[in-house]
Amino acid sequence: MSGVSNANNAPIIRDIAECIVTNKAYLSEIDGRIGDGDHGNNMAKGFAMAEERISDDDSLADGLSILSNVLMTEIGGSMGPLYGMMFEDMAEAISDQPVIDATQFQRMLEAGQQAVISIGSARVGDKTLLDTLCPATDAFASTPGSFQARLEAMKAAAAEGRDSTRDMIARVGRSSRLGERSRGVLDAGATSCCMILCTLADGIIRRLA
């Protein structure tokens, strides 16, 4: 099979939620070094709520939509709307697709990327989740070969993008007030985005025949 079924694959989103909840303390710890330290707690709260509402017979698009709704309406912080819009547009991109193949997955990634870009002022290099999301999306689009090979390239680029934020100066958000002092620590949003993309990719890979 060159893709996975949209139907009955919302458990992939539950896996993402579990990953975020498991890493709640770590995400808050790195956020606390240059931010307000609530990234892990807020993310875990929203993702855990979504996990409880997703059922095994929901589609992948349904799972993304449920997660989006929770993040936009039921948690605080700056990341709720950003991730909420990202997941909403990702869900819309595949809502009518019975099978998610590499082409549809790319459309989904690009829709999520554009959603984040459109509602914020950040760009690549500003020490935000875009420093993970954009190179990961680009790597998937530009890598030849099988769906799995492209997913593996996406994971590698996501990790590299996350790690690149360590040497960046924050230019948006609360951490931007620190200037040069924001250098030397990973961005929490870039880190959670890497977790999300890598868990998503692993969920797809496990289901490829």
Image (cartoon, rainbow, N blue to C red):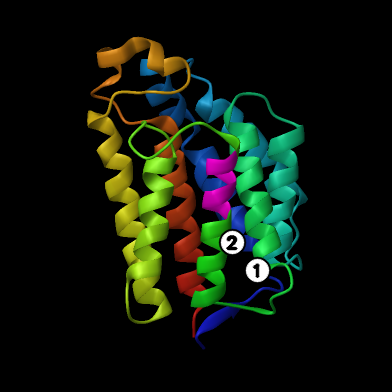
Secondary structure of the residue carrying tag 2 is helix
Res 50 label: none
Q: Which residue is drawn at 68% across and 59% down?
A: 91
Decide which of 99, 143 is in the foreground and name it: 143
C-alpha distance separating marks 1 and 2: 6 Å
Q: In this view, does 45 lie above or below 160?
A: above
Amino acid at the residue labelled 2: Ile
Amino acid at the residue labelled 1: Asn
What's the magenta region?
112-118
Horizontal arrangement in the rendering, residue 134 relative to residue 77 (left or right): left
Q: Which residue is drawn at 36% across and 17% down?
A: 33
Residue that label 2 marks: 12
| Image coordinates for residue 19, horizontal then vertical, percent | 50, 46
Q: Main secondary structure of the magenta part?
A: helix
| Image coordinates for residue 170, horizontal then vertical, percent | 35, 23
Q: Is residue 117 magenta?
A: yes
Question: Is the residue marked by circle 1 packed among few (<14), some (14-19), or many (20+) residues within 10 Å?
Answer: many
Residue 141 visible in the current orientation: yes
Residue that label 1 marks: 9
Badge 1 vs badge 2, beta-carbon distance below 8 Å = yes
Examine the image and state in which quarter residue 161 appears: top left
| Image coordinates for residue 186, horizontal then vertical, percent | 32, 31
Horizontal arrangement in the rendering, residue 23 relative to residue 166 (left or right): right
Q: In this view, does 166 lie above or below 139?
A: above
